[in-house]
């Protein structure tokens, strides 16, 4: 027994030296972790921005809304919603801007297009045209084809326009992180992917939240001309353009003010003025939405539809709004 | 009251606070399970992320509160000294409550996107997983942990030379608790460095500091329960703690594979975190050895149940499940999926939660001066929590396996209509398991709070114990567990662990990557189901043998010594072959019967020799211990 104790005493000394050695290795590795050649290439939130918002601000916004306890980022988080590390690479800025403005509903092609045009005019996107954008960001195309107009599970967090831009800057940053091959590249056969996607979507009882289901997927918002009466055509336009994602027709508050009873009402603005919602006001709101902001609603969320809609479209929409008493 | 030291009284209020926090954590957990089924439940009122922040932070803080309670309970016994000044403990208690209330008030600000930034420092809440509370809470907690470290060290002998391994273990533990927490104060501008230091806190807490406290407390509590030799416990604590540091320090880098940190961590993280199960196997092995030491029935079986459960889940949840996903080629699939949650629940609640509950059982019994109590509620709650936890683990594992296929192999990322529907069955299982767990928790809290109602006084216990009589035969499940059998069970658990590991690795196969999930589904299915069943069977077997042994010890205590058969070795009687005679009489005894030996020489040699033949199947009780007369009672156990 005593010899065992003696031996054990010696073994303990050896163990302690081994531990000290391990601590040495750990310190060396930790130093390399910050000074190695790989590290110097890592992206920096302060050098990346979008629409004048820095990725650093975006990181702060992401944390302030505790995005990590629903989503994951670099794989860490709650597994309750998609991983966002590479989302920018997949969808690009226009889709993200459209989605984050009204996270309760997946944006239609028209609304992504509106955002694209606006970002293009501002010089934030350099793709030649919308088709080139969709070709580059397959995730955006897939989302428009499959999900446009469908209810999303994310709650409406009432992001301001600046917060949305900051978040996009942050995702632009996170997509540049070198995640050493994670998540692994998808190598599955396209037929398997499509079959499984169709099966799962069917199982989930996919119900589109408003009536665009009769059209084949991928065509929503492409045909802006109809031969129907102006009010019906106006209603269809509010769906195709994605207005309905943010503006309810039953008086409930979504992202923006409800359409119900809007026409002809008195609207309080956040600059303290009150204006009548007449034709001129509505036209201005469609073409230059941030000029007059209704009290209690965020600025910079609704894109301008200038160039996306004709005068005839606007007339139809207003005719439709008149019917919503 | 049954406490030797005034400090110990304070442990009671910390355990009561712990139960309140625990109750809230479980309710939030159940709410999360419901939200998994209906993602829009309470949306806008309390969003999933806020509920989860509560679930995580409460989970951390109630276990820490339990640690504080346990250390206040055992610390004075270790140091033979009261804390001074006593008001500092009271202050710590109220400060803890203030911190909890403050944090609970700030976490919901996430729904409004308010973090309280000054520069890059979020003062109110900061949306970092596990560390969601803001800088105000961080600083207050750092002060609290420092006070607690001071108080604990105060109780220990002034001269460090007089410290044994238990002192060292707790000292490293309480200082580490505060030291590691310092890294919550780091605000990084970049995500990679933020995550890097976030894991300093999370990993080094649960996989180093907490582990060290856990090993030390288990060692101490078992030596109290079973009278295990302090030297042997010291041996276990030294090597346990060393292995934790050896494997856990660099093992931390299994968090650094894919977060934008350099790729060399993949090698080091895979290598050292694969060693992390070693201290955990070592720990449960010692629980097994210590349990056999006792020769008098323990007064608090539920406490042992929970402590055993803690060592077992540490081995299965932290050790085995941790191993299955820790190597880079497996981790690349597991990372960011429900498989992590399967490991996390079993490891965190299983290892640390169950331990502090076990300690609470003993501290509350002592505080209320209860001799014995009817234990059915405690055991019922143990089994419900055990089953619920295994179920939660299994549900996450099942959902995670499907998730890897749909989300990673096929790359489908539409949560509402692609990923969620694939995991639908797992969510139902999760809700069901969470419900069982909730029931177990409620019974547990009720039992701990109203333990006095089920008291059995010393008087009653004599009547109560009459039902224990010697038995002719012992069923297979109640027989003592040999070390070979114990080793076989552990090997079985590891076998299924390796099957799971193979399953996770099989996602790398070409056929799987092309879209055929059959192999991982089958292999992981066998692995996880087998792991759950064998864990359950092992716990049932181990605790049956324990119960049987305790019953027989009770029988032995009840028997009148004068009525027993006596072997008299005095005056050189039978010097030649004492052992043969003892064994011959012993073999005719029923289980729970005993024989008496009288000798004019010390019989320690016979004790050792009997061990060689009978293992731990007998109880040796010295009735008289020299110098002229030695009298020993040898009882037959299972």
Image (cartoon, coloured by chain):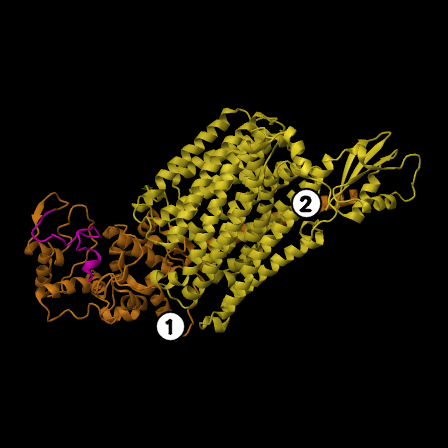
Chain colours: A orange, B yellow
The CA distance from mark 1 to mark 2 is 57 Å
Element under label 1? helix
Q: Is residue A211 visible?
A: yes
Q: Position of residue A73 (x, y in %)?
A: 39, 55
Query: Which contiguous range is marked in magenta?
Result: A241-267
Q: How busy is the neighbourhood of tag 1: few (under 14 within 10 Å), some, or many (20 plus)?
A: few
Q: In front here: B99 or B328? A: B99
- Of the two numbered discs 1 and 2 in the rendering, the one whose residue sits closer to the viewer: 2
In depth, the one of B416 and A7 nearer the eye is B416
Spot occupied by residue B68 in the image (x, y as percentages of width and height): 52, 35
Q: Nearer the viewer, residue A39 or B580?
A: B580
Question: Is the residue at mark 1 from the same chain as the one at mark 2?
Answer: no
Name the residue that disc number 1 marks: A195
- Horizontal side of B280 relative to B587 (left or right) equals left
Which residue is rendered at x = 61% and y = 54% of the image? B537
Q: Which mark is residue B548?
A: 2
Q: Position of residue B464 (x, y in %)?
A: 65, 34
The chain that hosts pointer 1 is: A
Determine the main secondary structure of the stretch shown in magenta.
loop
| Residue depicted at x 39% and y 47% | B31
Q: Quadrant of the N terminus of chain B?
A: top right
Q: Position of residue B145 (x, y in %)?
A: 49, 35
- In the image, residue B90 above or below residue B604: above
Horizontally, is A293 left or right of B175 in the view?
Answer: left
The numbered mark at residue A25 is: none
Left or right relative to A126: residue B33: right
């Amino acid at each position: 027994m005593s010899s065992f104790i003696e031996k054990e005493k010696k073994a303990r000394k050896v163990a302690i030296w081994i531990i000290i050695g391990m601590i040495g290795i750990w310190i060396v590795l930790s130093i390399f972790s910050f000074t190695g050649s790989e590290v110097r290439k890592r992206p920096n939130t302060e050098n990346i921005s979008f629409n004048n918002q820095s990725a650093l601000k975006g990181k702060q916004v992401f944390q302030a809304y505790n995005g990590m306890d629903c989503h994951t980022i670099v794989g860490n988080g709650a597994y309750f919603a998609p991983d966002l590390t590479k989302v920018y690479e997949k969808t690009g800025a226009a889709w993200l801007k459209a989605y984050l403005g009204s996270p309760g509903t997946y944006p239609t092609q028209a609304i992504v297009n509106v955002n694209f045009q606006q970002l293009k005019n501002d010089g934030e996107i350099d793709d030649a045209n919308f088709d080139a954008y969709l070709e580059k960001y397959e995730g955006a195309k897939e989302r428009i084809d499959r999900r446009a107009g469908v209810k999303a599970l994310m709650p409406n967090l009432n992001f301001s326009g600046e917060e949305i831009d900051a978040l996009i800057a942050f995702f632009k940053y996170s997509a540049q992180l070198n995640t050493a091959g994670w998540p692994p590249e998808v190598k599955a056969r396209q037929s398997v992917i499509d079959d499984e996607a169709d099966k799962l979507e069917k199982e989930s009882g996919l119900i589109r939240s408003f009536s665009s289901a009769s059209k084949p997927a991928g065509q929503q918002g492409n045909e802006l001309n109809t031969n129907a009466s102006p009010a019906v055509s106006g209603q269809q336009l509010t769906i195709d353009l994605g207005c309905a994602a943010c503006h309810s027709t039953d008086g409930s508050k979504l992202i923006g003010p409800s359409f119900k009873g809007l026409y002809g009402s008195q609207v309080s603005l956040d600059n303290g003025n009150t204006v009548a919602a007449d034709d001129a006001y509505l036209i201005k709101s469609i073409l230059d939405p941030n000029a007059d902001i209704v009290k209690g609603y965020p600025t910079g969320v609704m894109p301008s539809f200038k160039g996306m809609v004709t005068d005839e479209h606007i007339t139809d929409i207003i005719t439709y709004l008149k019917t919503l008493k | 009251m049954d406490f030797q030291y005034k400090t110990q009284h304070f442990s009671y209020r910390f355990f009561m606070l712990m139960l309140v926090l625990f109750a809230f954590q479980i309710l939030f957990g159940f709410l999360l399970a419901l939200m998994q089924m209906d993602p829009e439940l309470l949306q806008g009122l309390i969003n999933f992320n806020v509920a989860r922040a509560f679930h995580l932070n409460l989970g951390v803080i109630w276990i820490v509160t339990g640690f504080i309670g346990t250390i206040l309970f055992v610390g004075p016994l270790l140091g033979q000294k009261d804390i001074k000044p006593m008001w500092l403990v009271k202050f710590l208690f109220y400060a803890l409550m203030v911190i909890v209330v403050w944090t609970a008030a700030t976490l919901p600000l996430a729904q409004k996107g308010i973090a309280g930034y000054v520069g890059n420092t979020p003062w109110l809440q900061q949306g970092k997983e596990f560390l969601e509370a803001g800088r105000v809470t961080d600083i207050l907690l750092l002060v609290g942990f420092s006070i607690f470290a001071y108080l604990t060290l105060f109780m220990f002998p002034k001269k460090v030379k007089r410290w044994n391994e238990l002192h060292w273990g707790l000292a490293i533990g309480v200082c580490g608790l505060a030291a590691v927490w310092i890294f919550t104060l780091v605000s990084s501008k970049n995500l990679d460095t933020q995550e890097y230091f976030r894991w300093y806190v999370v990993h080094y807490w649960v996989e180093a500091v907490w582990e060290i406290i856990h090993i030390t407390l288990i060692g101490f509590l078992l030596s109290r329960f079973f009278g295990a030799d302090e030297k042997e416990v010291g041996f276990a604590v030294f090597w346990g703690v060393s292995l934790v540091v050896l494997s856990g320090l660099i093992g931390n880098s299994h968090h650094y594979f894919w977060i934008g940190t350099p790729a060399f961590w993949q090698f080091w993280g895979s290598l050292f975190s694969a060693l992390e199960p070693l201290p955990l196997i070592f720990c449960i092995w010692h629980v097994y050895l210590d349990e056999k030491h006792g020769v008098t029935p323990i007064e608090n079986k539920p406490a042992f149940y929970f402590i055993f459960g803690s060592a077992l889940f540490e081995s299965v949840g932290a050790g085995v499940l941790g191993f299955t996903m820790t190597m880079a080629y497996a981790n690349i699939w597991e990372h960011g999926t429900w498989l992590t949650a399967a490991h996390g629940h079993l490891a965190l609640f299983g290892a640390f939660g169950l331990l502090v509950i076990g300690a609470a059982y003993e501290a509350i019994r002592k505080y209320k001066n209860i001799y014995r109590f009817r234990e059915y509620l405690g055991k019922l709650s143990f089994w419900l929590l055990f089953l619920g936890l295994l179920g939660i683990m299994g549900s996450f594992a099942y959902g995670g396996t499907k998730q890897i296929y749909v989300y990673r192999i096929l790359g489908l990322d539409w949560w509402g209509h692609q990923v969620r529907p694939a995991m639908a069955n797992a969510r139902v299982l999760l809700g069901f398991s969470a419900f069982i767990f909730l029931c177990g928790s409620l019974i547990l809290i009720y039992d701990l709070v109203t333990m006095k109602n089920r008291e059995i006084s010393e008087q009653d216990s004599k009547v109560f114990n009459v039902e224990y009589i010697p038995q002719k035969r012992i069923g297979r499940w109640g027989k003592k567990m040999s070390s070979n059998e114990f080793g076989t069970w552990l090997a079985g658990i590891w076998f299924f662990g390796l099957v799971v590991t193979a399953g996770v690795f099989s996602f790398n196969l070409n056929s799987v990557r092309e879209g055929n999930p059959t192999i991982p589904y089958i292999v992981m299915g066998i692995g996880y189901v087998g792991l759950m069943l064998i864990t359950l069977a092992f716990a049932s077997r181990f605790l049956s043998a324990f119960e049987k042994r305790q019953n027989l010890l009770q029988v032995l205590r009840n028997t009148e010594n004068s009525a027993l058969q006596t072997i008299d070795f005095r005056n050189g009687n039978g010097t030649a072959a004492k052992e043969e005679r003892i064994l011959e009489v012993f073999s005719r005894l029923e289980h729970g019967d005993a024989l008496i030996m009288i000798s004019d020489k010390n019989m320690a040699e016979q004790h050792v020799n009997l061990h060689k033949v009978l293992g731990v199947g007998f109880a040796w009780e010295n009735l008289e211990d020299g110098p002229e007369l030695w009298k020993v009672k040898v009882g037959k156990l299972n």
